């Protein structure tokens, strides 16, 4: 796979509450094909960050352009868990345009569940 077939998306996840994440929290960020409601979501990339309370909430996803289908809709999704329990997730649709060289500055807001 050459460099032309790989693209990246980078950004940060944030929440508005003025609290620290519990020790041992895990951040997950997904790039998904959300084109069709009648089929399971297809994941193009995922980043799992253990100990997110120390590592931070930045993400850098790499996906293969061969997985991108013209006319499909793609979105980012993020969640933070602690002891396998969901504590934050995004509730807003976060669409992204794929195929450009490097998508940066993506800001995903997550909400307490």
Image: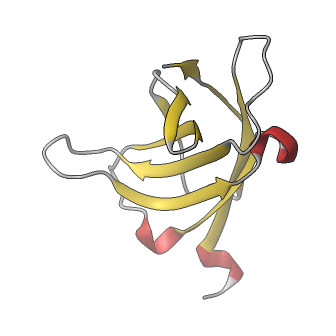
- Find residue 88 and report its horizontal and vertical position in percent: 56, 27
In front here: 37 or 85?
A: 85
Q: Which quadrant of the view contains residue 5?
A: bottom right
In front here: 27 or 36?
A: 27
- Find residue 11 and report its horizontal and vertical position in percent: 74, 41
Question: Which residue is at 65% across, 44% downward?
Answer: 27
Question: Which residue is at 42% across, 58% downward?
Answer: 43
Image height check: is 46 above or below 109?
below
Quadrant of the snapshot with the N terminus: bottom right
Image height check: is 88 above or below 53?
above
- Outermost residue toward the right? 54
Question: Which residue is at 76% across, 49% downward?
Answer: 51
Q: 26 left or right of 85?
A: right
Image height check: is 67 above or below 113?
below
- Outermost residue toward the left? 38
Q: 107 left or right of 87?
A: right
Q: How is the image coloured?
A: secondary structure
Q: 14 left or right of 89?
A: right
Count of residue discs = 0
- Residue 27 in view of the camera: yes
Q: 75 left or right of 28?
A: left
Image height check: is 94 above or below 52?
above
Q: Which quadrant of the view contains residue 109?
A: top right
In front here: 3 or 84?
A: 84
- Outermost residue toward the bottom? 1
- Find residue 48 and report its horizontal and vertical position in percent: 63, 56
- Residue 105 in view of the camera: no
């Amino acid at each position: 796979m050459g460099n032309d077939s790989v693209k990246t998306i980078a950004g940060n996840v944030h929440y508005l509450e003025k609290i620290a994440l519990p020790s041992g929290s895990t951040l997950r960020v997904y790039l998904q094909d959300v084109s069709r409601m009648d089929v399971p979501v297809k994941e193009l990339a995922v980043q799992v960050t253990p100990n997110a309370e120390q590592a931070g909430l930045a993400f850098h996803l790499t996906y293969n352009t061969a997985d991108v289908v013209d006319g499909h809709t793609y979105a980012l999704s993020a969640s933070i868990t602690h002891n396998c329990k969901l504590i934050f997730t995004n509730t807003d649709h976060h669409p992204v345009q794929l195929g450009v060289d490097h998508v940066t500055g993506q800001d995903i807001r997550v909400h307490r569940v």
